[in-house]
Image (spheres, rainbow, N blue to C red):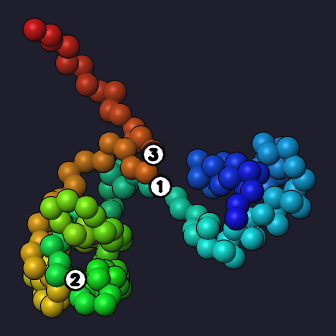
C-alpha cells in the first residue's frame, strides 16, 4: 500500500526525476531521511522502475535513427494468452515498448532503427516469423510534438499569415 506522502513523492518524481532529495523534502514538508526511505522502498517494490531523460533527437544532427510504431495481430496461445508472444517480442533490443491493446490490433510495438530498411528487415525476418503473429502494420514517426507529457520545442520561424474563412 502506498501512503499519501508517497503518492505526492511519485507525482513530483514523475514530473522531474532530477529533483534533489533536499528539494523533495521541502516540497513534501518532511525530513530528508524520510524521503530517502520512501524512495528506497518504492524502488525495491518496483513502483519506481527507472529514471528517464527525454532527448529531442532532431536537434542532434549526428543521430540518424528513426522510430516506427507497429500494430500486430496475434493468435493468443492457450494457457498464456498474449504474454508469451509479447515477451518474445520485447526481448529484441530494437523494441522499445510493447503494449497489449484493445481494438483492431492486439499488440502495439515501438521500435527504433537506423533506416527504413532495417525496420523492414526486423518486421519481415523477426516479427512476422513468430508463430502467433497473424499480421503487422508499420507506421513511421515523422515528427514528435509531445511525448510522455513533454512538449517538444515549437519552431518560431513560421511567419505565415493566419487565414480564416
Check contact, mark 1 vs mark 3: CB within 8 A. no
User: Is any part of residue 58 visible from this angle?
Assistant: yes
* Residue 92 sits in quarter: bottom left
Q: Which quadrant of the rendered structure holds the C terminus? A: top left
Name the residue located 32 percent from the left edge and 62 percent from the top edge.
Answer: 63
To which residue does mark 3 refer? 149
Q: Which quadrant of the rendered structure holds the N terminus? A: bottom right
To which residue does mark 2 refer? 76
Whether residue 31 is situated above or below residue 29 in the rendered picture: below
Q: Nearer the viewer, mark 1 or mark 3?
A: 3
To which residue does mark 1 refer? 54
Q: Residue furthest front?
A: 79
Name the one closer to the observer, 31 or 140. 31
x, y percent for residue 3? 75, 56
Name the one closer to the observer, 165 or 100. 100
Task: Decide: few, some or many residues near mark 1? Use Cα within 10 Å; few <14, some 14-19, many ≥20.
Answer: few
Whether residue 16 is situated above or below residue 71 in the rendered picture: above
Whether residue 144 is situated above or below residue 110 in the rendered picture: above
Q: Earlier in the sequence, mark 1 or mark 3?
A: 1
Q: Earlier in the sequence, mark 1 or mark 2?
A: 1
Q: Nearer the viewer, mark 1 or mark 2?
A: 2
Horizontal arrangement in the rendering, residue 87 relative to residue 3 (left or right): left
User: Is any part of residue 115 visible from this angle?
Assistant: no
In this rendering, the count of numbered labels is 3
x, y percent for residue 133? 15, 82
Amino acid at each position: 500500500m502506498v501512503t499519501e506522502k508517497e503518492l505526492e513523492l511519485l507525482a513530483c518524481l514523475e514530473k522531474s526525476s532530477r529533483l534533489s532529495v533536499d528539494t523533495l523534502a521541502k516540497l513534501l514538508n518532511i525530513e530528508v531521511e524520510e524521503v530517502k526511505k520512501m524512495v528506497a522502498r518504492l524502488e525495491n517494490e518496483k513502483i519506481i522502475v527507472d529514471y528517464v531523460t527525454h532527448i529531442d533527437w532532431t536537434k542532434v544532427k549526428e543521430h540518424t535513427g528513426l522510430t516506427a510504431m507497429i500494430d500486430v495481430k496475434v493468435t493468443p496461445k492457450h494457457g498464456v494468452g498474449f504474454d508469451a508472444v509479447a515477451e518474445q517480442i520485447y526481448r529484441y533490443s530494437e523494441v522499445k515498448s510493447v503494449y497489449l491493446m484493445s481494438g483492431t490490433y492486439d499488440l502495439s510495438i515501438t521500435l527504433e532503427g537506423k533506416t527504413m530498411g532495417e525496420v523492414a528487415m526486423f518486421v519481415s525476418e523477426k516479427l512476422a516469423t513468430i508463430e502467433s503473429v497473424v499480421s503487422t502494420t508499420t507506421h513511421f514517426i515523422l515528427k514528435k510534438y509531445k511525448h510522455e507529457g513533454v512538449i517538444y520545442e515549437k519552431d518560431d520561424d513560421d511567419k505565415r499569415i493566419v487565414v480564416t474563412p
